[in-house]
Image: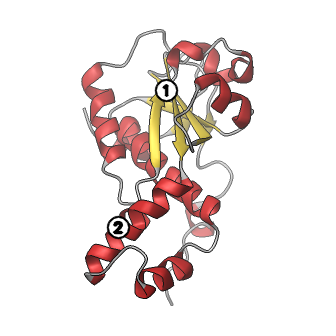
Amino acid sequence: MFELKNLLARKTVKNFLLEKVPTEILENAIRVAWRTPTSLNSRPVILLDISSKKNEEWIASQPAVRTAPHLFLLAGNTKMGETNARKFLAERYSSEIDDEKVEATIQRIITNREEWARQQIYLTAGYFAATLEASGVAGCFIAGFDKKVAAKNLQLPNGYFSELIFACGFMNSKNPGSNETDSARNFEEFYFPES
């Protein structure tokens, strides 16, 4: 069941039960990730189910991978993102994709193409993970892996780079191997209301 309280109590979980997450829950989260609002409607992100790759050298050393029944990789494509952004702007301005107004907007917003594409990946990852967490599925983000080896081994579509992995499943409550998300600082150190 989708509940906000699951998000407010979230932990970074590294030990999971072997039980797989029901397909309906995964599909809902994937559809939410697919619908993530991205900068200039660029949508440069793909989500790959890499659960069968958990024993490969480039990822197997990560603690959360050992027990997670599901692994998803998020990858991005700067060229596709920019092409989609140009189409979006051309439609907005009723112009061509290489029009001066389109180009000026692209230059103003996309100052570093790879960084910009990474931002869209992290937006998508947030929506995906939050939907799963609210549905009672625990998870752990993994950024520490050899991204070039991953891209080669997974044979990503042309132009895509690997960026982030989300290991997920139902938490092993006897030994979650978790980190409390609120232990580092209190709410008053996080949010500063306008005075």
- Front-most of 169 and 61? 61
Residue 172 in sight here:
no
Residue at the spot of label 1: 168
- The residue mark sitting in front, 2 or 1, is 2
How far apart marks 2 and 1 lie (CA) works out to: 35 Å
How far across and down, in percent of the image, does residue 125 sit?
A: 48, 45
Q: Under tag 1, what secondary structure?
A: strand
Residue at (58% x, 23% y) in the render = 176
Left or right? Give the position of 171 relative to 136.
right
- Check disc 1 and give the amino acid type: Cys
Q: Earlier in the sequence, mark 2 or mark 1?
A: 2
**Image quadrant where residue 73 sits:** top right
**Image quadrant where residue 90 sits:** bottom left
Q: Quadrant of the N terminus?
A: top left
Residue furthest to the bottom: 195
- Check disc 2 and give the amino acid type: Lys
How far across and down, in percent of the image, does residue 99 sit?
A: 40, 82
How far across and down, in percent of the image, does residue 17 sit?
A: 49, 13
Residue at the spot of label 2: 87
Give the crowd class for mark 2: few <14, some 14-19, many >=20 residues within 10 Å.
Answer: some
Label 2–label 1 contact, CB within 8 A: no
